Amino acid sequence: SQQGEEDPQALSIQEGENATMNCSYKTSINNLQWYRQNSGRGLVHLILIRSNEREKHSGRLRVTLDTSKKSSSLLITASRAADTASYFCATPYTGGFKTIFGAGTRLFVKA
Amino acid sequence: DTEVTQTPKHLVMGMTNKKSLKCEQHMGHRAMYWYKQKAKKPPELMFVYSYEKLSINESVPSRFSPECPNSSLLNLHLHALQPEDSALYLCASSPGPLSSGAMTDTQYFGPGTRLTVL
């Protein structure tokens, strides 16, 4: 089974609304990361949250981590059309020797 | 310079061709990665280099051959590819492994090479 699964798979909202995406993982981790990918481009790192942190903010982004439930959420507030992209969570795997990406959530923000 | 560059941006090749993808970073990172990404799927790890040595090969077919000539450069040599190898190939780098060998750093990605195999 896959380390790092996300829901929803796709999300369509109006500009100005908030967008929430969730990520679940299976093994113990020391950190979890979120990345954004615009269509057909490289991934851009958004935020890293460590296992001893419960919540982290960066601009309009808010990430939470619940290690007891092995889950994380990414909240984008006051979304903009430019936030349209795919969002992936990423977790260290096999002792941290590599990073595994979740299936991703495709976000579409309508202007 | 906080950028990872990849060339070419697009590549079309026949199944008998030999071509190479190139990746470069000048951030002093000691870990470099190749990923393959199909449409609407997450990136899949192919290879990891740590201090210019191959540390992870995710059972990638031998028609893909990575090379790390120096700490700034990563190549992926392609030979006798199949149409199903058509994908976006992403290169990434990170500061490097911890003393334990674990890689838990943020990765910096290049824009990718869109490969089409005819």
Image (cartoon, rainbow, N blue to C red):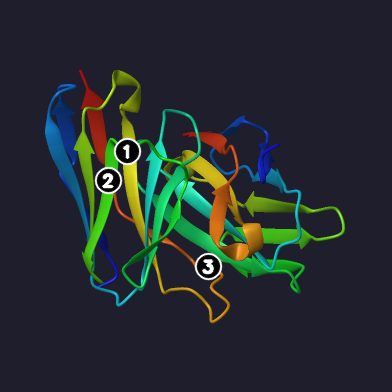
Chain at tag 1: B
Which residue is drawn at the image coordinates 58% and 59% (left, top)?
A33
CB of mark 1 within 8 Å of CB of mark 3? no
Q: Which residue is mark 1?
A: B62
Q: Which residue is mark 3?
A: B103
Which residue is drawn at the image coordinates 23% and 72% (left, top)?
B26
Tell me: B10 left or right of A76: left
Residue A19 drawn above or below residue B1: above
Where residue B3 appears, as percent x and y from the top left, is: 27, 64
Label 3 neighbour load within 10 Å: few <14, some 14-19, many 20+: many
Tell me: A42 left or right of A15: left
Question: Which circle, 1 or 3, is nearer the viewer?
Answer: 1
Q: In the rendered image, is residue B9 in sight?
A: yes
Chain at tag 3: B
CB of mark 1 within 8 Å of CB of mark 2? yes
Q: Secondary structure at mark 1?
A: loop
Where residue B2 appears, as percent x and y from the top left, is: 29, 70
Chain at tag 2: B
Q: Quadrant of residue B100?
A: bottom right
For the image, the number of numbered tags is: 3
Inspect the image, locate mark 1, and give the three-letter code of the amino acid beneath it.
Answer: Ser
Give the distance between the C-alpha atoms of the residues marked 2 and 3, in whole angstroms: 22 Å
Name the foreground residue: B77 vs A62: B77
Q: Which residue is mark 2?
A: B65
Dot 1 and dot 2 within a common chain: yes
Label 2 neighbour load within 10 Å: few <14, some 14-19, many 20+: some
Q: In the rendered image, is residue B112 in sight?
A: no
Which residue is drawn at the image coordinates 31% and 69% (left, top)?
B52
Name the foreground residue: B78 vs B117: B78
Give the distance between the C-alpha atoms of the residues marked 1 and 2, in whole angstroms: 6 Å
